[in-house]
Image (cartoon, rainbow, N blue to C red):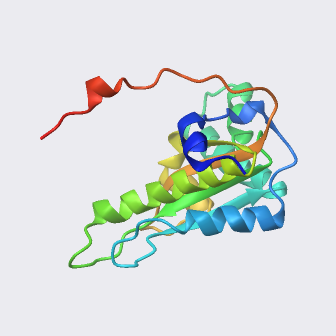
Amino acid sequence: MPDAIELLKTRRSVKPREMTGPGPSPAELETILTIGARVPDHGKLAPWRFIVFEGDARQRAGEVIARVFARKNPGAPAADIETERKRLTDAPLVIGIVSFTKPHPKVPAWEQEMSAGASAMNIVTAATALGYGACWLSGWFSFDRDVLDGLGLKADEKLAGLVHIGKPTKPSEDRPRPVLSEIVTRF
């Protein structure tokens, strides 16, 4: 297990197209999801849930995305529809983080939505700590109500993102990071 500080300092996203199997074992997946549920959560509301896409479920979800895309883009070339169909098939495992809010007198919706974001980041970090590549993504389909309905989300639920997890096929390149002197002020 890598040193926690070193892991956090060097974590990088791995593009799903640069992932392969095998994905996490059932025990590793349980660990990842447990860590995903262990986030700041004012009011103990658990304003998130997870959808696991593995095996054929990735293709079935892709069919939902492709069907909606084709209906909303009637002139789209077959290649574009096929691209949409394969949205979740590169990595062996994809975890959808579903966000919803509950009315609460002390916990505004914004805090609940941030808790879902923290959950997504914990999933990315846990997968990375276990030796997998991980990438938190969204896309047009993450905000399309017809796709969300097709994936089983309720009317009041949103998709905070999809975390793709698999074995990296090559080292991931780092990207430029913010310069602290440009983003930190003191009050």
Q: Which residue occupies the foreground of this view, 152 or 16?
A: 16
- Position of residue 186 relative to residue 65, above or below, is above
Q: Residue furthest left?
A: 187
- Position of residue 50 relative to residue 13, above or below, is below
* Picture coordinates of residue 120, whole percent (x, y): 53, 54
Residue 13 is left or right of residue 61, and the answer is left
Residue 106 is left or right of residue 177, and the answer is left
The answer to whether residue 136 is seen in the rendering is no
- In the figure, residue 97 lies in which quadrant? bottom right
- The quarter in which the C terminus is drawn is top left
* Picture coordinates of residue 94, whole percent (x, y): 70, 52
* Picture coordinates of residue 85, whole percent (x, y): 73, 41
Q: Which residue occupies the foreground of this view, 68 or 58?
A: 58
Q: Residue furthest right?
A: 22
- Give me the residue at 73% from left, 57% from top: 53
The answer to whether residue 149 is seen in the rendering is yes
Q: Which residue occupies the foreground of this view, 134 or 143?
A: 134
- In the figure, residue 45 lies in which quadrant? bottom left
* Picture coordinates of residue 163, whole percent (x, y): 62, 49
